[in-house]
Image (tube, rainbow, N blue to C red):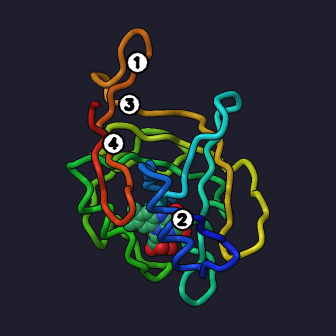
Amino acid sequence: MILDYKDINDLNRYKIMSGTVIPRPIAWIVTDDNGVLNAAPFSYFIPISSNPALLLVAIGQKDDGSPKDSLANILKTKKATICFVNKDNVEQVQKCAIQLKKDESEIEKFEIEVKEIMDGFPPMIASSQSAMFCEYYDTYEIKGDITPIILELKYQYIDDDRINERNHINVENIGRCGVAFKALVDL
Ligand SMILES: Cc1cc2nc3c(=O)[nH]c(=O)nc-3n(C[C@H](O)[C@H](O)[C@H](O)COP(=O)(O)O)c2cc1C
């Protein structure tokens, strides 16, 4: 079967693309707006360069057409902390996908524990095995309702026992496969 994208509506494009490009990592992004901590998951997310260390995340709009809070906060403060999801916090990340008002904090409402470990950056989700402390780098302008932004990775937290002396990493991330969350498993 050949699918012709000019004949496919937005919802079905999303269903087909996100069901095919799997597994996708989830960026659980913490941002701050004058002390209101925002946290939300994004799976249109990918590393694009190691030097400079850049990651791309594509963020859409709220139902009323305004930018999602994460995007508004990143454009305002130029900072974002990307946390990774594991089996211990997958229920919390799902709650964070609920659309809240701009002045409401997912961190407070869902009682998610965070820890401040990097001055000048939003805190990380305490249960994440790794977190990336990023600065805004650029926006890639495209037509449509999505804004792909590029973030530069400045610092990374990783649990001591998940990195070895050869910089081999062992994180138990959960990713997105269609509508499901899946753990990375060995072949
Ligand atoms: C696993 C998962 C992945 C998601 N990926 C994206 C994404 O890549 N881009 C996007 O705009 N929304 C995505 N969403 C929806 C946002 O998380 C949701 O709109 C959230 O309310 C945005 O919060 P904010 O307004 O606080 O930024 C995803 C939701 C889930 C559960």
**First in residue order: circle 3 vs circle 1:** 3
Q: Residues within 10 Å of mark 4 (few under 14, many from 20)?
A: some
The amino acid pointed to by label 3 is Ile
Q: Which numbered dot is residue 1?
A: 2
Q: Residue at x 30, y 70 (%)?
A: 95
- Extreme-front residue of the structure: 1
Instruction: Determine whether 163 is above or below 174 in the image.
Output: above
Q: Nearer the viewer, residue 58 or 133?
A: 58
Q: Which numbered dot is residue 173?
A: 4
**First in residue order: circle 3 vs circle 4:** 3
Q: Quick check: can you spot residue 129?
A: yes
- Circles 2 and 1: CB atoms closer than 8 Å: no
Q: Secondary structure at mark 3?
A: strand
- Circles 3 and 1: CB atoms closer than 8 Å: no
Percent coordinates x, y for residue 8 in the rendering: 61, 78
Instruction: Determine whether 159 is above or below 96 in the image.
Output: above
The amino acid pointed to by label 2 is Met
Q: Is residue 54 left or right of residue 178?
A: right
- Extreme-bottom residue of the structure: 64
Mark 4 sits near ligand 1, with its Cβ under 8 Å away? no
Percent coordinates x, y for residue 12 in the rendering: 52, 77
Look at mark 3 in the image and give the residue it sits on. 158
Look at mark 1 in the image and give the residue it sits on. 168
Q: Secondary structure at mark 4?
A: loop
Q: Residue at x 47, y 79 (%)?
A: 103
Q: Residue at x 54, y 33 (%)?
A: 155
The amino acid pointed to by label 4 is Asn
